[in-house]
Structures are given as C-alpha cells and as structure tokens.
Image: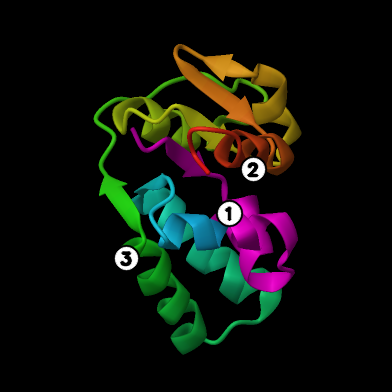
Amino acid sequence: MTPRAVLDTNIWVASIRWGGRPSRIRRLAEQGIFTSVLSLAILAEITRVLREYFGFSDEEAYEWHCRIGESSELITPSRFLNAVPNDPDDNKFVECAVEGRAEYIVSRDDDLLRLGRYDTVRIVDDVEFLNILTRPPFE
C-alpha cells in the first residue's frame, strides 16, 4: 500500500528553492512512491509564499501550482479542527490529513512537530519521512 502524506508549505517551498531532502521528497511524490494529499488552502499558500517571499512571477508561481496539483490528490476538508492552538493557521494541514486519510504530515514547523500525532496521523520531519519511505517495503 502506498503511503499517504500531507506536505507542509515549508517542505514544498524548500523543495523548489533549495533542493536537498525536501526536493527528494517532492520527486518521490511525482514518481508515485507515496501519495501527496493536498487541499486548495495549502496549494494557495504555497503559491502565495513563492510570489510574496521569493519573488516568483505570477507565471512561475502558476507553473508550480499546476505541477504540485498534478502530482497530488486534491481533497476538500469538510470540517474544521482546532488541533494546533499555538498556530491555528496550521490546522489546515491536520484537516487535510484527516479528511484525506493520510498517515503522515511532513513538516519543519515546530508547532506541528511538537504535536507529534493527531488521531492516526503521525507528524514527522523530512529526515524521518525519507527514512520511512526508504526502508522496506517502500524501497
């Protein structure tokens, strides 16, 4: 069974800007090694961050919007959760994971990582997620 994961905006942006582990994770999603689960709210945030913080043109940001959307399963959360009281904006990742039946949220965000787990969803950093994906049976 293919693992399902929600990637935090910081993982997507790092994969585009700097490479390294986040870029490897993005490529594994594009190859179908795991299923990236995404909501429109997350996709909009990625696009906004690329434009506002990294100077991407509308066209460049849109190209990434499409590429990320095409390599992910898009879901629409039907309920709102208060899982991350220290940073309510991070609730969208938990909502997406729960609604999208993801096993993992992959993040570098301290508020999410401190949570560690929500219901059946494990919250892990990029190092741990790559370890999960590269150990049997996911090799």
Residue 116, how many percent across, how many down? 65, 19
Relative depth, front residue between 121 and 41: 121
Q: Amino acid at mark 3?
A: Glu
Identify which residue is drawn at 31% across, 33% down. 100
Asked which secondary structure carries label 2, the reply is helix
Task: Tell me the residue that label 2 is attached to.
Answer: 130
Task: Tell me the residue that label 1 is attached to.
Answer: 25
State left or right for residue 100 relative to residue 33.
left
> Magenta segment: does it hold 12?
yes
Quarter of the image that includes the N terminus: top left
Identify which residue is drawn at 65% across, 52% down. 10
Q: Kindly indicate whether the residue at mark 1 contacts the one at mark 3 (C-beta within 8 angstroms).
A: no
> By what rule are the colours in the image chosen?
rainbow
Task: Tell me the residue that label 3 is attached to.
Answer: 70
Q: Kindly indicate whether the residue at mark 3 contacts the one at mark 2 (C-beta within 8 angstroms).
A: no
Relative depth, front residue between 60 and 82: 60
Mark with earlier residue (1, 2): 1
Magenta span: chief secondary structure:
helix
Residue 3, how many percent across, how many down? 42, 35
Q: Amino acid at mark 1?
A: Ile
Q: Which residues are magenta?
A: 1-25
- Measure the C-alpha gap from mark 1 to mark 2: 7 Å
Q: Kindly indicate whether the residue at mark 2 contacts the one at mark 1 (C-beta within 8 angstroms).
A: yes
Crowd class of label 1 (few under 14; some 14 to 19; many from 20; radius 10 Å) = many
Asked which secondary structure carries label 3, the reply is helix
Crowd class of label 3 (few under 14; some 14 to 19; many from 20; radius 10 Å) = few
Relative depth, front residue between 4 and 10: 4
- Measure the C-alpha gap from mark 2 to mark 3: 21 Å
